[in-house]
Amino acid sequence: MTTQPVSLAKRVGQTTWSRLADTPLRAFLRTETGSAAVLLAATVAALVWVNVHEASYVGAWGTEVGAHIGGAALTLDLREWVNSGLMTFFFLTVGLEARREFDIGELRQRSRLMLPMIASLGGMLLPIGIYLAFNGGSGAAHGWGAVMSTDTAFALGVLALVGPRFPDRIRVFLLTLSVVDDLVSLGVIGFAYTARVSAMALVVAGLILGVMTMLVVLRVRGGAPYLVLGIGAWVAMLESGVDPVVVGLASGLLTYAYPAARGDLERASDLFRLFREQPTPELARTARSGLAAAVSPNERLQQTFHPWVSFLIVPLFALANAGIPISGRFLAHAYTSPVVLGIIIGYVVGKPVGVVGLSWLVTTVTRGRLRPAVGWAAVTGGGAVAGIGFTVSLLIANLAFSGEQLAEAKLGVLTAALLATLLSVGVFRITAMLPTRARIRALLGTQETLVDLVAPFDPDRDHLRGPIDAPVTLVEYGDFECPYCGQAEPFVRELLAKYGKSVRYVWRHLPLNDVHPHAELAAEASEAAAAQGKFWEMHDLLLDHQGALTVKDLVGYARELDLDVEAFRGDLRDRTGSGRVAEDVESADLSGVTGTPTFFINDRRHHGAYDTETLAAAVKEAQARVLMRA
């Protein structure tokens, strides 16, 4: 995109594009990595606080806070405000990311959604069975729900730290598991751990969520209606007796994600241009609205809430709930307790065995028609990481237990999280020791990658650099006047020099005429040079002189390249290359490309930074997939 000054990109190691245009999933995972450390620190702080001064810990989180409006009152203690109030935003972000993957990510191919959904059921049912085997027939059996759920924040953070460096498919598999876990767990909270259910309040909450759904279907913009309805649904759900955090997850799953449309981007450019010419408050407001409308509400809400959730709300939840008074007597008794053993073995053994076992069973029964989008080592490692059940497990533990049993359940959840982390480290370390081809297959599986590029490489048409039979094809949609394309060009050249015979590079035109007045002419000039066999020479000159793209400049470049200047002038005057440029623009539109530079590697869109290191990592993965299929 070309919305920032060129100077902003001159930072060490990354381009401006890498920071501003990272994919939501990559930003999500990067935030989870950092927040996992904050979450761990909050957990340790809770343990220290409660063991240094238990009375102050219990008293602080038991403080009642309420709101009174007329005769109506809503009063909860601080722990309840965190667990049922702030955690609603945590489940909102989980729902938003799941919906984004469902709309435009890995899960847009619906068959890829089915197996992790089924596998998540195995990852819930087997741990429940193990827990009941230890606690069946006792009063503690009621706590079976504490071994169901995967903690999304902790699990994704751990996976980002200890998992393989291949891109996001493994993370998407785990994300799907955890979202299904959360949905089922929230349903269990509502129906198994709610002593009193008000049918009328539940109906009201359902009606409000129905109205929100209608507004989403009608594409009603503006956050105010959704905020009011969300608060209403939350209060109604609280009054019904069902934990209101379900409102957050439902709201996230209702929020559409879609790529920015060319028309919306052009409209935003026009509005900003009007403001630039006449900077009035009215035009500033209109320009802001136009810019916001170009980005899907899903991505806007993620950008707003996800950092707050990851670095404040979830750690605050840990601080409020993870405190356990620890003593030698308590530990000696707890680690022989059926509650603790049921939770630990349920999570550390039951989760991975349930996930892998049911995945294998479905793959076998369907003869591979349904199979994991990742390899079996990744399924096993993801299943192990799924044994980190922190957030929802503690929520259910607080509902199911009290007194010493609650402390035991918390200890079991924390111990299981530690052991599940170590188990996942072991799985991925062992996988890393395999021979290259076996390791790739074990991590990535054999399922074909999704194709994003509608018009594949055509050797008879496309402008090509590199060997025609190279295993990896790098396609760039670019604009000769776009400063970011100019910044990307040295990285592309370095990549081609480094990988030699392994990569072929293709340039396709996408002039952004609404922001670059000379881009179309420059593209047609490159085609005029191509007619005389010097496309790449002209391509390099244009990107090296992006500030000088007038007709006079272009003719000067033709002379510098020893072209037939009169023929070149004639092609520019007759716009001989306009048809070719229009074909590239049409293929860009069909592939969902709206900004420059946009790269595709073996027909799969490359997201994020385009520095040499990042592009090289993507090329290595593409080579690995080619090797795996050989």
Image (cartoon, rainbow, N blue to C red):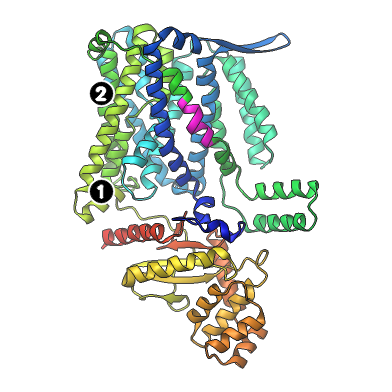
- Counting other residues with Cα less than 10 Å from the Cα at mark 2, is it few (<14), some (14-19), or many (20 or more)? many
Q: Is residue 340 above or below residue 30?
A: above
Q: Secondary structure at mark 1?
A: helix
Callout 1, which amino acid? Ala
Along the line of sight, which residue is nearer the eye, 320 or 392?
320
Kindly identify the residue that appears in the image at 29 percent across and 23 percent down. 415
Describe residue 142's horizontal placement relative to residue 217 as left or right. Answer: left
Along the line of sight, which residue is nearer the eye, 133 or 163?
163
- Quadrant for residue 272, please give it: bottom right
Q: Could you give the CA–CA distance between mark 1 and mark 2, rounded to whole angstroms?
A: 26 Å
In this figure, which residue is indicated by the disc labeled 1?
Answer: 442
Report the predominant secondary structure element of the magenta stretch.
helix
- Residue 345 is tagged as 2
The span picked out in magenta is 306-315
Q: Is residue 308 magenta?
A: yes
- Counting other residues with Cα less than 10 Å from the Cα at mark 1, is it few (<14), some (14-19), or many (20 or more)? many
Q: Earlier in the sequence, mark 1 or mark 2?
A: 2
Q: Is residue 203 visible?
A: no
Q: Is residue 177 magenta?
A: no
Looking at the figure, which quarter contains the N terminus? bottom right
